[in-house]
Amino acid sequence: MEEMIAAFRKAVLRNYATFAGRAGRAEFWWYCLAVFLLNILVNLADAFLVSPLLGLPGQAGLLSAILGLALILPGLAITTRRLHDTGRTGWWQLLWLLPLIGFIILLVFCARRGEAGPNRFGAAPLPLEGEAPPPG
């Protein structure tokens, strides 16, 4: 739980729109989990609190829309830094435009181990707070 919070803080508070550098697998996937859980909570709040109070029919998703807008840049930035860790540019994110195939390719790229040592995008990422340093 602490790693997830540390990854979310690092991505959203310290590196909100930082596209330079590298992000390790743990940082990226903990951030993804935090955003997923936050989306569930916000969707529940939309469905059971906001929509009934405002008299909006169905799922208007006002809070979800605000959260989505707030997390566009950090999501793009951390994905770019994750791709940098694997030796690829952030432009590979354009694969999202290819239905299903693009998602699968990006999923594989983000799941792969990063390059050891420095690469053209910078030094290897530091471990998250409370995480053991990588071996070697």
Image: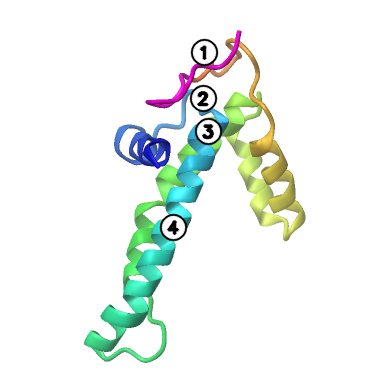
Choose the circle earlier in sequence order: 2 or 4. 2
Q: How is the image coloured?
A: rainbow
Q: How far apart are marks 4 and 1 (CA)?
A: 30 Å
> In the drawing, does residue 4 fall left or right of residue 121?
left
Choose the circle earlier in sequence order: 2 or 1. 2
| For the residues bearing labels 2 and 3, Cβ distance under 8 angstroms | no
- Residue 99 falls in image quadrant: bottom right
Give the labeled residue for mark 4. 37
User: Which structural element holds mark 4?
Assistant: helix
Residue found at the very far left of the displayed protein: 53
Q: Residues within 10 Å of mark 4 (few under 14, many from 20)?
A: few
Q: Which mark is residue 123?
A: 1
Which amino acid type corresponds to the residue marked 1 in the rendered image? Ala
User: Which structural element holds mark 1?
Assistant: loop
Which amino acid type corresponds to the residue marked 2 in the rendered image? Arg
Instruction: Work out whether residue 117 or residue 40 is closer to the camera in this orientation and state it.
Output: 40
Q: Which of marks 2 and 4 is in front?
A: 4
Give the labeled residue for mark 2. 22
Which amino acid type corresponds to the residue marked 3 in the rendered image? Ala
Choose the circle earlier in sequence order: 4 or 1. 4
Q: Residues in magenta? A: 126-136
Kindly identify the residue that appears in the image at 52 percent across and 15 percent down.
122
Residue 53 x, y percent position in the rendering: 22, 86
